[in-house]
Image (cartoon, helix red, strand yellow):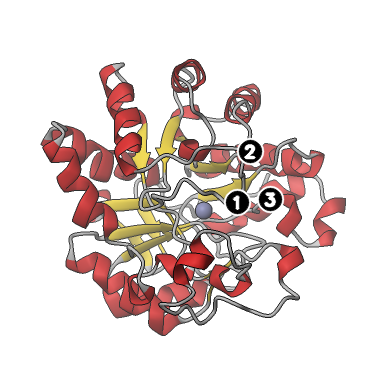
Amino acid sequence: MSSIKDVNRGTIQTVLGPISPDQLGPTLLHEHILCDIRPPSWKALEQIGAHVTLENRHAIDYGEVLAPGNYLLDSVELAITEVKRLQEVGGTAIVELSCGGLNPNPSGLKAVSQATGVHIVMGCGHYVEEYQPAANGARGVDDFAQEMIAQVRDGAWGTDIRAGLIGEIGCQAPWTPQEKRIMKGAAIAQQATGAALSVHPGRDADQPQEIADFLRNEGADLTRTIISHIDRTIFDDDRLFRLADMGVVIELDLFGMESSYYKLNEAIDMPNDASRLTVLRKLIDRGHLTQIAISQDICQRTRLSSLGGHGYGHIFRNILPMMRRRGFSDIEIDMIMVGTPRRLLTLG
Ligand SMILES: [Zn+2]
């Protein structure tokens, strides 16, 4: 394994360089600022949705209109406007998880951070196989591991801009052999760099547990592993508590999505923000306060405030006040928004 002497242990590694952990502040742990998350089979279609209007916005969000352009965040200028709106309401840091397959843009993120003063911590590795280049099919575990280590240590995607965590590492259900090789590589890279690992599970209620079991076997640090998108994946206490007992961080990161309709899995009843808070309360009451993350996973134009959506500031404007009204204490809110992100993002 190559030398890891240059990893900035004890710091948080942003796209503008390392900062001290106490500089981070309230953080969104799972967002996209610049990405192309159009399903590959949609990329050839006309980019309907790139121009969201009052007339089409609801139809796009409710799946009446197939709108590939809605899944394309490609304007640095618009991103700066949107991230400034987060800053105005108290957000100081964003974890940006547009990794391989999602058209990562480190230079664009650097420009957004420079223009706004908001800390951006960038992920690395690869999203689900469906989005990956064909060449990944021939690559082995160590090749993927070395790539992720280098992305944290030296810079990512042809730049000297370093990733500050690993992920979101994509899994589909059923989990593919190629995705498992990447996850094994991610476990190696996590141990080599001390970076946290963020996982995107497939849309199957048993897959978060399958991934957590797999990572434990691979020697990953589960206390520094975030299982994303739990609010569209697990709907029962047995699975939720069993997963929490593994020590992983449970992330509810679709705050702001209030529609029961979920294009990517029409079989599930999507929760709303109030029911997400009910899940958080259950986890806290069971002793899992330090294992909770919340975010919005913005990756569509209709969710940007400039286009009539809730924007990156939604959790700060609406959810934190709702939490206070519902009896969440300042200590609990501070742990979720500041303490846990600081712990996870500090290279260990
Ligand atoms: Zn994401």
Residue drawn at 63 percent across, 70 percent down: 68
The correct choice, above or below, for 149 with respect to 69 in the image is above
Q: Which of the 4 quarters of the picture holds residue 116?
A: bottom left
Q: CA distance from mark 1 to mark 3?
A: 19 Å
User: Picture quarter containing residue 109?
Assistant: bottom left
Q: Is residue 324 above or below residue 59?
A: above
Instruction: Tell which circle, 2 or 1, labels the residue nearer the N-terminal end.
Output: 1
* Residue that badge 1 annotates: 149
Which numbered disc flags the more N-terminal residue, 3 or 2?
Answer: 3
Q: Are marks 2 and 1 in contact (CB under 8 Å)?
A: yes
SS type, badge 1: helix
The disc labelled 2 sits on which kind of residue? Ile
Residue 348 horizontal/vertical position (percent): 41, 40
Image location (x, y in percent) of residue 180: 73, 38
Ligand 1 within 8 A of label 3's CB?
no
**Which residue appears at 48% of the width and 50% of the height?**
165
Seen from the viewer's position, the closer of residues 65 and 283 is 65
Using the rendered image of the protein, determine whether residue 138 is visible from the camera's viewpoint: yes
Which residue is the site of mark 2? 188
Relative to 258, residue 40 above or below: below
Q: Residues within 10 Å of mark 1 (few under 14, many from 20)?
A: many
Q: Which residue, given by chain and number where applicable, does mark 3 sit on?
A: 128
User: Looking at the picture, how far across and down is residue 129, in whole percent?
Assistant: 74, 51
Cα gap from disc 3 to disc 2, whole angstroms = 19 Å
Q: Residues within 10 Å of mark 2 (few under 14, many from 20)?
A: many
